Image: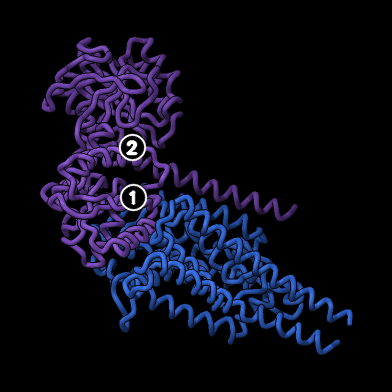
Chain colours: A purple, B blue
Amino acid sequence: MKKFGILGIVLTAILALLVACGDQGAAGGSEEGSGGDTGGGDDGDKRHAIVFKSTGNPFGEKLMEGFEDAVQEAGGEAILRAPEQPTVEGQIQIIEELISQQIDSLTIVGNDYDGLEPVLTKAMDRGIEVLSTDSAVNENSRMVHVNQADPEAIGRIQIEAVAEMIDYEGEIAVLSATSQASNQNLWIEWMKKELENADYENMELVEVTYGDDLRDKSVSETEALLQSYPDLKAIIAPTTVGIAAASKVITDKGLQGEVVVTGLGLPSEMAEYIQNEVSPWMYLWNPIELGYLAGYTAVALSDGEITGDVGDTFEAGDLGSYEVTETEDGTEVLLGDPFRFDIDNIDEWKDVY
Amino acid sequence: MTEKNLLKHINLANISKFREFGLLGFIVLLAIVFQILNPAFLTFGNLADLTKNTAILSILALGMMLVLITRGIDLSIGATLALSGMIAALTVREFPGLSPLLAILIGIVVGVICGVVLGFLVSKVGILPIIASLGLMNAYRGLTYWISGREWVSAYQMPASFKDIATSSILGINTLVFIAIMIFLFFYYFVNNTITGRQIYALGSNPDSAKISGINSHKVYMLVYTMMGGLSGLAGVLWVSKFASAQGNTASGYELTVIAACILGGVSINGGIGKVTGVLLGAVLLGVLDNGLPLIDVSPFWQMGIEGAIILIAVLFNTIVKQTVEKSHRLRRVI
């Protein structure tokens, strides 16, 4: 019994330590998150709120920055909020507050697909236009979803890129995340469809391997590809850890220029390898543009210009005209092709996310 | 009659003594199979990759061996590795001019502190190692996220000198491999030729009589967990340097791979048994599997299955040998 008593004390101490850590970490981030919250002011301007997953996330900061730009361009007021921890509870609390502030629209980046349904339906019942972006919520919880890029474009663009890098000739391989990752598998399907095009008849996809988004496994898989296919010209890695691990292997082996790497990766992780030209360029979503489009979608909804039904069209500032399209689950507005990161713009993005 | 028994005993002793040769034979067999299926396996380049990728695992497995010999276990090493790697990475990000040796030292110090905490909980407070290290695993992992602010330290934020730790060579041998060899030699000497080394075995095979015979068990427990922590810290810096990226979830679950390497190498979870050469071979076997399976065209589902089956076979083999030896001991006592 004595042992358990002491164990209890120690575990409590550890818990207390963790809670203390959590509080401090959150306190550091919340300041940033609420920085854009310009508060009330009933001066007739429409008020558009965005609730991100959590504070202190560089991707989220950029997303909210784009949202704020769009709303201000349209003459509205932007309210930027995020809970301290990426939880549903935190988001529900914030949304309740926003409902009582009688905002005009609410853009949610969901921490859960279904969990926000009660509070979001409540918001819609009170006449607030609700839309989701980046990370969707279910069909019943929102009027429209603003999506980054569709799987087809993501798959096809990577093949187009790799073809340009290797002059439409040679062996290519794919280094994916886990073999069950639904995103990656869908993109790879589209890559294979794109490869059926006659332009790519001299290119061959020799293998699809899975690095499980683990550094060590991704490195082993890349090394195995290089050993098994000495004539390999390119590796496509549609995953952050994979693309960086593959680039690191190519760098260490001094194969710059012989084997190129492209795919989807974080600019910060890839800055080194874009600068040393192992990866001429790669893709990811542009959070600022995504936030900007979400901002204009929110404005269009609250102005009654669109209702979130298929076929609605609206102008999204500098981005041009957009149409609401149908998906498997509700309707969406599609931003378009993923953003290209290359040696000319990587410096401005590597510190962003 | 006695002669026959004696003969049998010698044979069995040989098996348990030369168990490492069995493992070595298995590795050779596996290598031949891989070589037949993909001729790229036994090339200089691939073997260099293999040894480089196995270095970190073998460093950790040697530390884990000592912990297992004392009938303990340390589940927190993956988190310790991540924490010390992250702290080293954050330090070199802030001070790019820092000597890589100092970065390694920082990692080791962080690891030692983590190990001391666990050693204290196990030896002084008397918490079961599996529970104490499970708790600390989560605590250290959480600390890693907190310190890093959930962000990664990427390649461009690390100075070249830091990344060179993993890519440079000492005496023509890759630094990672060189460090692993040095640690192997040290351990070989330490467990076989020093009093403390032998005390670890004594405490593991029979804690009560070890204490009665005057071995300071607290000191020994403290020592093995501290050494394990220090090695995890070292491995953390090497890991981050090798992959040029520090994430909060680095090496998550890696402790199980390390324990698997020890078990493959003949270390007994029940304590008291384990050899440095065996553990090294266990790590090499896992390294060969990790390197070879991607080279032959098997589906990722099978890769995991094959790895699991091989571990099970090795453990079964180990148990059977042990049971037969014990049986023969009992028989001799009767006669």
- Which quadrant, please, contains the C terminus of chain B? bottom right
Q: Is residue B232 above or below residue A294?
A: below
Residue A128 in which image quadrant: top left
Is A248 left or right of B284, judged from the image as shown?
A: left
Chain ID of residue with mark 2:
A
Report if the CB atoms under discs 1 and 2 are less than 8 Å apart.
no
Residue pointed to by mark 1: A208
Q: Is residue A308 visible?
A: yes
Is B12 left or right of A218, judged from the image as shown?
A: right
Is B208 left or right of A293, judged from the image as shown?
A: right
Residue located 36% across and 52% down the image? A209
Circle number at residue A223: none
x, y percent for residue B158 = 26, 61
Residue located 76% across and 72% down the image? B208
Residue located 29% across and 57% down the image? A246
Residue most toward the bottom?
B3
Secondary structure of the residue carrying tag 1 is: strand
Determine crowd level at label 2: few under 14, some 14-19, many 20+ residues with C-alpha closer than 10 A: some
x, y percent for residue A52 = 33, 31
Circle number at residue A186: 2
- Which quadrant, please, contains the N terminus of chain B? bottom right
Determine crowd level at label 1: few under 14, some 14-19, many 20+ residues with C-alpha closer than 10 A: some
x, y percent for residue A183 = 35, 38
Q: Is residue B184 above or below residue B46?
A: below
Q: Amino acid at mark 1?
A: Val
Q: Nearer the viewer, residue B17 or A347?
A: B17
Query: Which label's residue is closer to the chain start, 1 or 2?
Result: 2
Residue most toward the right?
B335
Secondary structure of the residue carrying tag 2 is: helix
Question: Marks 1/2: CA distance?
Answer: 13 Å
Q: Nearer the viewer, residue B10 or B122?
A: B10
